[in-house]
Image: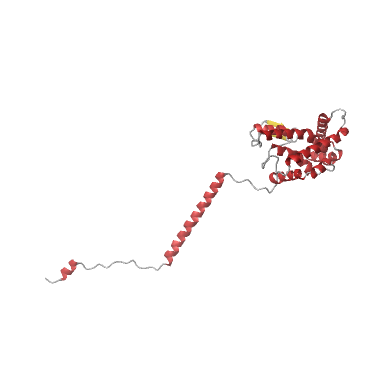
Amino acid sequence: MLSNMSTASVPELFCGDSTVQEPTQILNFMRKQRLNADYELTARQGADTMAYIALLEEKLRPALLHTFWVDAENYANLTRPWFASRSPFPLNFLVPCRHANIALSRILLTKGEAPLHRISEMEGKIYSDAKECLNLLSYRLGAAKYFFGNSPTSLDAFVFGFLAPLEKANLPSSPLLSHLRQLENLTGFCDNILATFFSSDRPCPPPPVQETVDANLQKLTQLVNKESNLIEKMDDNLRSSSPQHKPYRAEPKAGLSGANSSTPA
């Protein structure tokens, strides 16, 4: 279950007594539970997955944090009202500010190399790195449906988690979104995952095999019963339509002994 009740962190996974935060930690936790979408990947593909996830964390995450939490227009018109409306009092005042401070600290920690020490000095570098990351992802995806073959893997989930909020949020200001919309294969990638796994009219999964067998057996039994009833009705109709005759009783024939007894002596 994903929740934001205990620490106001998104995403946060609760599983029994365990609480896991951050996408990378959640994926590692699920792998330990043998819920792994990468079991069919080769060693090379597994290494590529880890490399691209590290690239996303280093190049794209700071730009997303800046877009949603540091950009004044986006924060005032979208991010803060959204989080405040979904948090009870008094968290509706505390949670947005807390997230904004954490985002700013994280950006300064990861991108604050000398001589860039202020956030305004870093914006150009932040978005330049993010656009480069998007270009690499677009080149790697190409015309394929997913990054590795015909089935989604943890890399697909990771990339979708980064790109979908950027694409679907109604951001008043976002140079990164403008660049993303120029990469049609990445926007199509997000739309495909939304339609396949998050659509309200997606087809229901097939029933279990045993339920299917039981249902077929029940239908067969009903069909046999109907056939039996039909045969009985046909027999009744034949009996009622045929003429009634008295049962034939054979007349006794005179035997030789009778003939001899009637002859005069």
Camera-side residue of 45 and 240? 45
Q: Is the C terminus in the top left, top right, bottom left or bottom right quadrant?
A: bottom left
Q: Is residue 193 above or below residue 35?
A: below
Say how the picture is coloured: secondary structure
* Left or right, 17 with reference to 235: right
Q: Residue furthest left?
A: 265
Image-quadrant location for residue 146: top right
x, y percentage for residue 80?
82, 38
Q: Is the N terminus in the top left, top right, bottom left or bottom right quadrant?
A: top right
Camera-side residue of 39 and 79? 39
x, y percentage for residue 18?
68, 31
What residue lies at 75% left-to-right and 43% top-to-bottom? 186
What residue lies at 82% left-to-right and 43% top-to-bottom? 178
Q: Residue furthest top?
A: 114
* Left or right, 81 with reference to 156: right
x, y percentage for residue 24?
72, 33
Q: How many marks?
A: 0
Residue 15 visible to an observer of this rendering: no
Image-quadrant location for residue 249: bottom left
x, y percentage for residue 101?
83, 32
Camera-side residue of 183 and 239? 183
* Left or right, 96 with reference to 39: right
What residue lies at 88% left-to-right and 33% top-to-bottom? 121
Residue 141 visible to an observer of this rendering: yes
